[in-house]
Image (cartoon, helix red, strand yellow):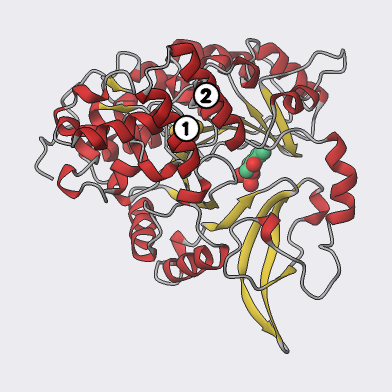
Amino acid sequence: MNNKQLTWDDSPSLKSYTLANFRDLPQIQNFSEQQQFEMEVVGNVLPFKANNYVVEQLIDWNNIPKDPMFILTFPQKNMLKPGHFEKMSNALKNNLDKKEITDIANEIRLELNPHPAGQMELNVPTLKDGTKLYGMQHKYKETCLFFPSQSQTCHAYCSFCFRWPQFVGMDEMKFAMQEGEQLVQYLVEHPEISDVLFTGGDPMIMKARIFSKYVDTLIDAKLPNLKTIRIGTKSLSYWPYKFLTDSDSQEMLDVFRKITDNDLHLAFMAHFNHLTELSTDSVKRAIKEVRATGAQIRTQSPILAHINDDSEMWAKMWSKQVQLGCIPYYMFVVRDTGAQHYFGIPLVRAYEIFRKAYSSVSGLARTVRGPSMSATPGKVHVIGTANLSDQKVIVLRFLQGRNPDWVQRPFFAKYDENAIWLDDLKPALTEKFFFEDEMNILKKTIPNDDYPES
Ligand SMILES: *Cc1c(COP(=O)(O)O)cnc(C)c1O
Ligand code: SF4
């Protein structure tokens, strides 16, 4: 990279690049008009956001169009299927007005998102008094997800992310909850919950002052069941200055310290997709600052075509994480929404990449589990492939199940090199998967499934 390398002594201010201003970037102006137009077509459907750190320090502009950080951040033509691309391309060429373009974008988005808005309405958790908690999800017994209304956006929008409906003003798809108190009430009513996972969007987009309010409410409630506060975030990779030089960086670190001083575990679930994101001075320094608060950083990422479908890179990434004091946690399979056709990797191939990487790192990095699908019945782990007498199978287990009793029981699917999601798999040896009948009953009452990878 020939870009200026900032050190952590610098305190850059955040500059965002989106559809509205990406053509201002000199690096983008080097692209042909055709390429810029293609980005605009895709960007009108799949929102994107970059910032000066990503542009100056993570993307290698000498490696376009293949650079993984570029593909992760900026829209690529093939992220839309040809029909969708053409539809939006024609709309722009015909200079349709803003509202017409938004309508077309929303039509395409709805086709990409299998969770219709109404279903979310039906399936939100409720308090005993009947209050619906739109800002929460509670799928697995011990852990509830909390979506603070101030964290419905991110430092950058990962192009594979399924959470984009909430970034683009489709209000009915927005989870939002103002009240930390409702969260506390839910935790009182559900003593089985030990972990609250702050998610979004990215909760680290919140100002320390606001995050602190939620944390205080939780701490002051002195809930005997609450053991862990988790934060799912991509801030370390996309804006490490959040913990270094932003005006509220010290205040945020103080909130972390307050959590650990109150004998709660702070699990910082950091989203790293590529080794490059661990390479700058700023991220290393930020990791140190976060760890110094007593927080434990765990790492997770989906496995993605064009970005990280490379076992050597994963091995290096996990080793680097351990060296920096982070615990590798999950490798996810990219979910069945949005640009899955672009990023998706067959399960068998994901497993091979995982196995190669896993077998070449120290035991300290083998805390990682994957590839794992956050599917409707639960988190399904592809353990491997095997030959059972004359039949080749894929071996699976639940890491988390809608019914906790499903966890850790091996089950088998017919070997299929093309399957990319649980729905593509057929049971082997049995008529049905062991959980299918129960799942069909549960399906009528379940909360929605969206789980942010960050
Ligand atoms: C993954 C996930 C969690 C957290 O699961 P852990 O295995 O404890 O990390 C919680 N809720 C949902 C909906 C999830 O998908
Ligand atoms: S993957 Fe995480 S950081 Fe990326 S856009 Fe989605 S919620 Fe935001």
Q: Position of residue 375 (x, y in %)?
A: 68, 48
Q: Which residue is mark 2?
A: 104
Residue 281 occupies quadrant: top left
Q: Secondary structure at mark 2?
A: helix
Observer-nearest of 69 and 210? 69
Whether residue 404 is visible, yes or no, is yes
Residue at point 25%, 47% (across, down): 65
Residue at point 10%, 35% (across, down): 4
In this view, 365 is above or below 289 = below
Q: Which residue is mark 1?
A: 87
Neighbor class of circle 1 (other Cα within 10 Å; few <14, some 14-19, many 20+) is some
**Residue 177: which numbered mark, if any?**
none
Horizontal relation, residue 282 to residue 409: left or right: left
Kind of residue sitting beneath label 1: Lys
Residue 94 occupies quadrant: top left
In this view, 240 is above or below 341 = above
Q: Secondary structure at mark 1?
A: helix
Observer-nearest of 449 and 403? 449
Horizontal relation, residue 313 to residue 33: left or right: right
Whether residue 259 is visible, yes or no, is no
Q: Position of residue 212 (x, y in %)?
A: 51, 14
Rounded to the nearest angstrom, the CA distance separating label 1 from label 2 is 8 Å
Kind of residue sitting beneath label 2: Ile
Residue at point 43%, 15% (across, down): 208
In this view, 363 is above or below 168 = below
Q: Position of residue 122 (x, y in %)?
A: 80, 24
Horizontal relation, residue 13 to residue 88: left or right: left
Q: Position of residue 118 (x, y in %)?
A: 75, 24
Q: Where the N terminus falls, by quadrant?
A: top left
Q: Are marks 1 and 2 in contact (CB under 8 Å)?
A: yes
